[in-house]
Image (cartoon, rainbow, N blue to C red):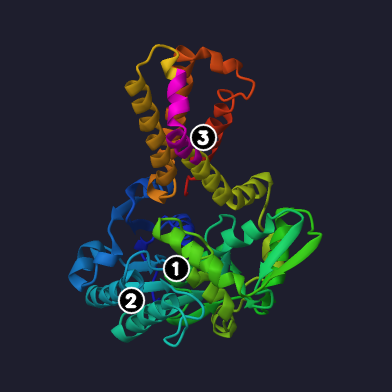
């Protein structure tokens, strides 16, 4: 980039990399505007900048981009998705939208810094990498001023994607499960990615393509163990190297969860990327800047870590267990209510309710339980489902206290046992906070 920008548009501004880039640019005194789909998330993560609402998957022609480029000197693209959530999403987001941006940027004389991914080639084995490569190629062919940065496995204080997976694995107590233990991985700290982006934006890095990776690759097993040491977890008593046949089963389950809105780091694309290795060539970036990407151990020593990071890793590991427990608990509660409708109705009839009303009440609340069990499995509804579980539980407790107060003295404690369920739903609600 030949000159320092006055006004930068950051795509994916409130994401893992984007938010870091925005803050770094602000420290340089640059005016920053963001672009993203979720105004609520943007206001929470970046309350002090303007984030224009826009869905890149729908911005597929140059005219869609021109309104966003008015007064802009430079666009930094930090947006991306690992795997399709709908048919064609990756192609639209990584290629067609970027090709349209390139055309508009050329016409508006706006420079572009593209954050791509190491291993993005047209011959890659995943749609993610191939779509990224097509977007990179469109930028390079457009005639726009373009710098493409391709990070390896990005590690930072926040935990998303590959970083989250590493921390979840590191948090497993006693044993250390590792899949694909010999896979070569070259990492890069989020601070080094941000530094490279800002350097390119401020004119300190010439146009071209640069892999952002440490000089020496590590095995995936060593990366996981280094993460475990950094977080301060106890050394494992046993390293459990997971058989390769388990991975496709895990990926299929994670993909099913993905269709329900859960962004698991174990989906098919993530595993395929790891299976191919995460490696690049650091020479171009080192030659252009005179510095290397910090090696993993040195970089981890430079990141402060505390109890909150260990807690976050444990909570991420427990999240699927918590959601599954709540789902099974409420489904079983509803199913038992339908199955034992006569017995349950007799409790109400003993207090003076009519038989039809008693049975109708039992069946109604049983199906409410089953509906809540289903709702918590759908990620966009999960948080509200947790609050609904708390509300319904409180209705149960209050109603039962009024109608059948003797249940509080039942030796099996059916009333008392509702309280831990309420607390688990409240905890799950907080765990579901994405950013």
Q: Which residue is mark 1?
A: 82
Given residues 365 and 255, the one toward you in this image is: 365
Residue 128 is drawn in which quadrant? bottom left
Read off the residue under disc 2: 95
As drawn, which residue projects farthest toward the left?
Answer: 63
The residue beneath circle 3 is: 426
At a point 56% along the width and 49% down the height, the residue shown is 319
Q: Which SS type dominates the magenta stretch?
A: helix
Between tags 3 and 1, which lies in front?
3
1 vs 2, front mark: 1
Residue range (magenta): 332-347
Q: Is residue 239 magenta?
A: no
In three-dimensional space, the C-alpha distance between marks 1 and 2, rounded to whole angstroms, equals 14 Å
Label 1 neighbourhood size at 10 Å, few (<14), some (14-19), many (20+)? some
Q: In the drawing, does residue 260 fall left or right of residue 408?
A: left
Q: Position of residue 11 (x, y in %)?
A: 36, 63
């Amino acid at each position: 980039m030949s000159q320092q920008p006055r006004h930068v548009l950051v795509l994916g501004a409130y994401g893992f990399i984007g938010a870091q880039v925005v803050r770094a640019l602000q420290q340089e005194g640059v005016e920053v505007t963001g672009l993203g789909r979720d105004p609520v998330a943007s206001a929470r993560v970046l309350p002090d900048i303007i984030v224009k609402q826009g869905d890149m998957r729908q911005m597929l022609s140059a005219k869609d981009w021109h309104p966003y480029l008015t007064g802009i000197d430079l666009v930094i693209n930090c947006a991306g998705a690992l795997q399709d959530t709908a048919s064609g999403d990756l192609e639209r987001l990584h290629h067609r939208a970027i090709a349209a941006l390139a055309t508009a940027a050329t016409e508006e004389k706006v420079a572009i810094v593209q954050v791509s991914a190491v291993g993005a080639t047209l011959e890659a084995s995943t749609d993610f990498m191939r779509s990224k490569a097509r977007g990179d190629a469109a930028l390079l062919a457009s005639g726009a001023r373009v710098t493409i940065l391709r990070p390896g496995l990005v590690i930072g204080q926040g935990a998303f994607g590959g970083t989250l997976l590493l921390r979840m694995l590191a948090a497993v107590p006693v044993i250390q499960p590792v899949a694909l233990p010999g896979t070569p991985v070259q990492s890069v700290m989020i601070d080094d990615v941000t530094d490279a982006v800002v350097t390119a934006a401020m004119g300190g890095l010439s146009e071209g393509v640069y892999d952002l990776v440490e000089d020496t690759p590590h095995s995936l097993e060593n990366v996981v163990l280094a993460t475990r040491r950094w977080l301060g977890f106890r050394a494992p008593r046993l390293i459990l190297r997971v058989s390769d046949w388990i991975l496709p089963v895990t990926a299929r389950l994670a993909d099913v969860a993905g269709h329900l809105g859960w962004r698991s780091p174990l989906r098919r694309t993530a595993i395929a990327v790891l299976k191919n290795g995460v490696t690049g060539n650091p020479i171009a970036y080192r030659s252009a800047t005179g510095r290397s990407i910090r090696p993993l151990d040195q970089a981890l020593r430079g990141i402060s870590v505390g109890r909150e990071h260990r807690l976050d890793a444990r909570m991420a590991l427990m999240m699927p267990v918590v959601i599954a427990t709540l789902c099974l608990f409420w489904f079983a509660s509803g199913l038992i209510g339908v199955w034992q409708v006569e017995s349950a109705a007799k409790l109400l009839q003993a207090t003076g309710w009519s038989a039809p009303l008693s049975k109708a009440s039992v069946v109604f609340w049983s199906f409410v339980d089953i509906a809540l069990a289903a709702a918590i499995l759908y990620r966009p509804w999960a948080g509200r489902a947790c609050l609904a579980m708390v509300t319904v539980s409180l209705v149960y407790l209050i109603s039962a206290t009024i109608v059948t107060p003797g249940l509080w003295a039942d030796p099996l404690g059916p009333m008392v046992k509702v309280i831990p369920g309420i607390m688990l739903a409240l905890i799950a609600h907080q765990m579901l906070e994405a950013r």
